[in-house]
Image (tube, rainbow, N blue to C red):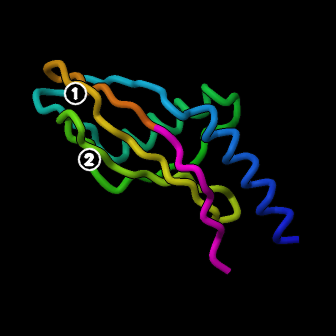
């Protein structure tokens, strides 16, 4: 039964990964170009939901995204069964307060720990 559930989660994550391989976003906040970890997670979740037509997934990001070209962070998308999928975020450009970034899903799912 666990294998069936993991297969369904893998299929769902694969669809999400395909839907978000590269999607650009931009934000403008205050005078320091950075995006809080919480706001980044919320934004990614909303973008994935709108791209896939699925409910917004649970995403956590460990760090603030600082608006410097090339900066990266790695967030995690979590399924209800505890499986996770990495989501890589990379700053592509900065225009004053505006941070532009792309994100993509990793190619593999990390199964839930038993």
- Name the residue tied to disc 1: 29
Residue 113 on the magenta span: yes
Distance of label 1 from label 2 (alpha carbons) = 12 Å
Q: Give the residue furthest to the top.
A: 95
Please give left or right for residue 10 compared with residue 27 in the image. Answer: right
Label 1 SS: loop
Label 2 SS: loop
Q: Which quadrant holds residue 36?
A: top left
Residue 89 place in picture, x, y as percent: 38, 41
Residue 28 place in picture, x, y as percent: 25, 23
Say which quadrant the C terminus sits in. Answer: bottom right
Please give left or right for residue 2 compared with residue 93 in the image. Answer: right
Residue 54 on the magenta span: no
Crowd rating for badge 1 (residues with CA inside 10 Å; few <14, some 14–19, many 20+): few
**Residue 66 higher or lower than 83, as above or below:** above
Label the magenta part by its dominant secondary structure. strand
Residue 97 place in picture, x, y as percent: 17, 23
Please give left or right for residue 92 compared with residue 40 in the image. Answer: left
* Nearer to the camera, 88 or 39: 88
- Name the residue tied to disc 2: 64
**Residue 75 higher or lower than 21, as above or below:** below
| Region rendered in magenta | 104-114
**Residue 84 higher or lower than 49, as above or below:** below
Disc with the residue nearer the chain's start (1 vs 2): 1
């Amino acid at each position: 039964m666990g294998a069936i559930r993991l297969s369904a989660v893998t299929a769902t994550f694969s669809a999400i990964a395909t839907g978000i391989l590269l999607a650009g976003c931009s934000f403008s906040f205050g005078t320091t170009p950075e995006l809080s970890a919480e706001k980044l997670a919320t934004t990614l979740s909303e973008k994935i939901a709108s791209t896939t037509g699925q409910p917004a997934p649970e995403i956590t990001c460990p760090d603030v995204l600082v608006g410097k070209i090339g900066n990266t962070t790695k967030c995690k998308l979590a399924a209800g069964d505890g499986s996770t999928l990495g989501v890589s975020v990379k700053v592509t450009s900065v225009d004053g307060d505006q941070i532009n970034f792309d994100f993509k899903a990793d190619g593999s799912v990390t199964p839930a720990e038993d």
